[in-house]
Amino acid sequence: MNLARFPRIRLGHLPTPLEPMEHLSRRLADAHGKGPKIWMKRDDCTGLSTGGNKTRKLEFLMADAEAKGADTVITQGATQSNHARQTAAAAAKLGLACHLLLEDRTGRRDAAYTQSANVLLDRLHGAVIDHRPGGADMQAEMEILAEKLRAEGRRPYVIPGGGSNAVGALGYVYAAQELLGQAMELGLRIDHVVHATGSAGTQAGLVAGLVAMNSGVSVLGIGVSSPRVTQEAKVLELAQDTAKYLDLPGIIRPHHVLANCDYIGQGYGIPTEGMVEAVRLVAECEGILLDPVYSGKAMAGLIDLIRKGHFAADSNIVFLHTGGAVGLFGYPEALASD
Ligand SMILES: *Cc1c(COP(=O)(O)O)cnc(C)c1O
């Protein structure tokens, strides 16, 4: 695969580290001290405005925006969207205007959630923020805004929620290449990659890249919003689009796409006990911050699946840390210990 064919603007600190989680692996081992070895791919360290997985997608999306002569980017997400924050930062760096449409997906009204954390950073990066009620057709709302800006003489570029289309997913095809290169250097046979899946671009790009390279690595997305059937269909469609965009149509089959959506709890952005336990455990035994909406729930899933013996004891699991720790400041009640 030759990703250099696609325009890309460097925004992230890449490659991100691939680190062994020795304490965490030991804490999750069985009574005989046996259990999978956990590694972490530190995409929380991409650097852009505290980093996260959207940075890799934005390297390709912002290059496409510039190639198309845009002077403004529009995107959307939940109030505490990490994607909105990283898009605002990328736009600031490139001198583009940025409009964010934030959807109220949790119904929360407190200042920590509505003003602090990602929202605070969106504002610092100079983004124009507008709000929409939960359940709004956010893609349609963005198109309406784009039309209005065009009428004012602007040249807007619309980035879908989460940066999840074939262009954005190239960022995770690239991540798949990066990861396999690191595994080769370490002499590490990766059996599984586990990560949080939402708008699907991360998993779609990883799957497209790992299948294209005939890696034999399986990817398990832990869902944070939709039921499994919906989530797997969304990932499959985008992985197939991405493969087509890479000139490799037909390589992605339904069995390549696996999601587990048993760890969502009451809904997107609503804390669960497992999330709180996961955030605390990883903070305490590895000194690493997960987030309450995505990586915390994904780690809660990984912990539970390891405890249930889902993974072979001699397997190597890479947890892709997709970032989001800024969001912790939007959840003080759920996470503060007494
Ligand atoms: C957006 C996001 C995800 C999910 O990635 P998708 O590509 O939208 O599936 C996971 N973790 C964090 C921290 C995110 O911000």
Image (cartoon, rainbow, N blue to C red):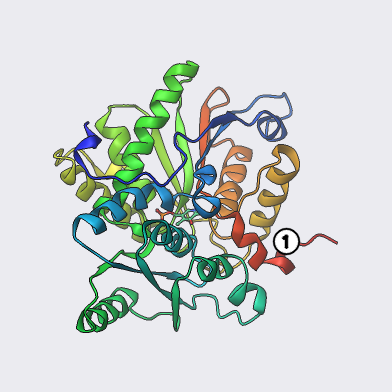
Point 29% across, 49% down: residue: 60
As drawn, 2 above or below 165: above
Specify the quarter for ligand 1.
Answer: bottom left
Point 52% across, 27% down: residue: 316
Point 31% across, 64% down: residue: 160
Between 61 and 98, the one lying in front of the other is 98
Kind of residue at disc 1: Leu
Q: Is residue 268 visible?
A: no
The quadrant in which the C terminus is found is bottom right
Residue pointed to by mark 1: 335
Between 301 and 186, the one lying in front of the other is 186
For residue 214, side relative to residue 135 (left or right):
left
Outermost residue to the right:
338
Q: Is residue 310 visible?
A: yes
Point 23% across, 47% down: residue: 242
**Image spot of residue 165 (x, y percent):** 27, 56
